[in-house]
Amino acid sequence: MELVSVLVAIVAGAALAGGVGVIVVEQNNPDKVVEQRIEQGQKAVEPEVLDYGSR
Amino acid sequence: MRPNGPKLYATCAMLALAALAPVLRPGYVLVYDMVFTPEQPVNAAAFGLGDALPRAVPVDAVVALATQVVPGQLLQKLALLAIVFAGALGAGLLVPTDKTGVRIVAAVAYSWNAYVAERLFIGHWTLLLGYAALPWVAMAGLRMRAGEPHAWTRLVLASLPAVLSAPGGLLALGTALATAGRRKAWQVMAIGVVLNAPWWVPSVLHDGLSDPAGVEAFSARGENWGGPVLSVLGLGGIWNAEVVPVSRANPALPVLTVLLLGAAVLGLRELSKRLPVWPLAGLGVLGAVLALLAVLPGGVAVLEALIEHVPGAGLLRDSQKWVAWLALPFAIGLAVAVERLRARLLVAVLLLGLLPDLAWGGLGRLEPVHYPADWAAVREKLVDQPGDVAVYPLSAFRRFDWNDRRTQLDPAPRYLPGTTVVDDSLRVGGKVVAGEDPRAARLRAGDLSGVGWVLVEHGTPGRVDENLLARLEKVHDGPDLALYRVPGAVPDDPFGPPVAPVVLAWVAAGSLIGASLLWRRLPVGRFASPRHEE
């Protein structure tokens, strides 16, 4: 019984995590953001000195 | 601890291909700190004798020497594949079990996680080579603990990928100490001191200190509602939001992190009956604490004081990297926790599903590109020419059209022959972290003394002082690069650390590696040992 519970939890976790993960990726993947920018005719403004990254 | 069948090897190969298949296309992957070039120059800085703190020693020397015989892009592909394949295989083999499925869970947990993804995407391939070596170091340490004759030679060879960088070397040393036990600690320390000498000797001889501003800029970061603590415990939490896989924002992650860690602890309890794993688990806790130090109350002040006054404490900057120590006990503990489950491979599927965007080179993050022809043309012009090269615009990082405007480290120091001076100050979210190279500081002040050439890279953000260029003689004018000769340039005197101790460090490390290879690969070891080692 305990084993079944663990398995159910794992499968549910996988489904939840995988599902949410895929949705988040779909909504936020870098290519999509770039495509949206192009569609909107926006041009990215480059800074004078490049950042190593942002927090 | 014997491998059981080819399934584990096949799984590790599939993991490596799933993550890195696009990398196998011709060209160079250039993202953030990862720079490979066709043939890296063999110069003093690569061996720790340059003006700046030796942050890429000894890896620069090793890559420079290797690319004299192997094309740089082939070396890069091998190194990247080795990270995932060797890390996964090592973790799988470390678990004392007869069940291949259990080994596969360990392999997936160790090689398909946020740490690997984030450090790959920020280009920290040398750190990851060290990470991949940790299971092998642990196996060698356990053999030393068991009193196996000449097991130290295994430790030396297993540590080689790790000692390519300072953090990797320390990660390996900690793992070896935790697994070899107290009785072998002095042997492990001696090996660690000698093997890591090529970076620590020039570092202590260098009188530079790091900028304490880096502590806050590079501290661990929360990736979801779990904040930095649960992000780090989930092996993520790198400072740079731009390299974090989007799946790390999954709202289920904090809960799953706690559940998986809990399962790993239960697994470690079971595993402790077969292996002395608690020191390794303790090291994992230490790694997590170090990673979180800068976000704990008062942590920033302590770290800033250390970095300001203690040479070498700059290693504690970007401290999230130390959570690598947690990954190994987590992976093997989780694997043993699911040993009794029939559907244990579902756990491996869960781990893959939690991080789908590590697949296929991070869904386009890791993509090989070709250098424009200008780079080879400028290189040709500078071969056998005296004088150092100053590179403009003054910025450590570049964003070229030919690399899909990815942020990447300036490739000039590793592409051009001779010595190149680049601006080594870093900007994080608009905040400047001062550099460590005194010559770069002079360059920022407009001082070209000791510089024989000026290279201007086009198509990347940043301005170049036209008045400065007007005083120079143009020798190459291409669409991507322009090269200028500085009239009447007088070479600078070397400003690096004294040569003799650095050479001695290299000789000592090389001798230890050579002796270990001889023991293991040539008959001399067999004759010297009364017992067969295997």
Image (cartoon, coloured by chain):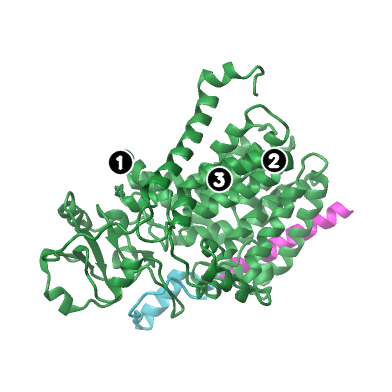
Q: Quadrant of the C terminus of chain B?
A: top right
Q: Which dot marks residue B180?
A: 2
Labels 1 and 2: the sequence-earlier one: 1
Residue type (three-letter) at the residue carrying disc 3:
Val
The 10 Å Cα crowd at callout 2, few under 14, some 14 to 19, many 20 or more, is: many
Tell me, what hue is chain B? Answer: green
Residue at the extreme right of the image, as rendered: A1
Choose between B155 and B452: the one closer to the eye: B452
Quarter of the figure with residue A25: bottom right
Q: Which dot marks residue B68?
A: 1
Labels 3 and 1: the sequence-earlier one: 1
User: Which residue is located at x 56 percent, y 39 percent?
Assistant: B158
Residue type (three-letter) at the residue carrying disc 1:
Gln
Residue B136 image point, x, y percent: 61, 40
**Magenta residues (range):** A1-24
Q: Is residue A5 magenta?
A: yes
Residue type (three-letter) at the residue carrying disc 2:
Ala
The 10 Å Cα crowd at callout 3, few under 14, some 14 to 19, many 20 or more, is: some
- Say which element carries label 1: loop
Closer to viewer: mark 3 or mark 1: 3
